[in-house]
Image: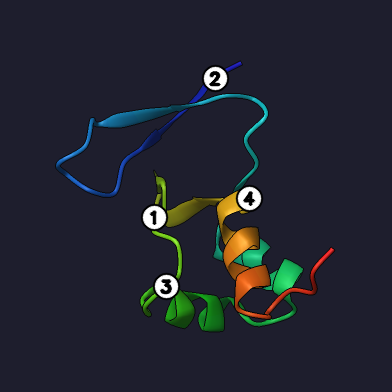
Amino acid sequence: MLARIRCVAPRYRDYVRIDSGTELVIAVDIAKRLGISSQRVNVLAIGPGFPKPLGKLGRSAVWRWSTVERWARETGRLAAE
């Protein structure tokens, strides 16, 4: 099953195809997994180094969890496995 989400950047296609193995997360999901508030996620998201969102679902930015998880481990916000 493939999902379609609206891209954030206008220079890209209008929609991105995502396979069923891709885990998508929004700020609330990231906050729960990192043990921080969703407001803090939104602050981090506009700062340098945080992964760019893949697109939007409604009014929420959407990221691939694997990308956010890599960033969190590299910055010490999530313990290494």
In the displayed structure image, the side of residue 43 where residue 73 appears, left or right: right
- The local secondary structure at tag 1 comes to loop
Dot 3 amino acid type:
Gly
Q: Which residue is mark 1?
A: 59
Q: Determine the CA span between mark 2 and mark 1.
A: 20 Å
Inspect the image, locate mark 2, and give the three-letter code of the amino acid beneath it.
Leu
Left or right of residue 57, residue 66 in this image: right
- Disc 3/disc 1 C-alpha distance (Å): 22 Å
**In the drawing, what numbered circle is on residue 2?**
2
- Residue farthest along the right direction in this orientation: 81
Query: Can residue 57 be seen?
Result: no
Q: Which residue is rendered at x = 24% and y = 31% of the image?
A: 14
* Placement of 33 over or under 61, stated as above or below: below
Quadrant (top left, top right, bottom left, bottom right) of the N terminus: top right
Give residue 26's position: percent from left, percent from top.
56, 57
Which residue position holds label 3?
49
- Gap between marks 2 and 3 measured at Cα: 28 Å
Amino acid at the residue labelled 1: Arg
Which residue was labeled with disc 4?
66
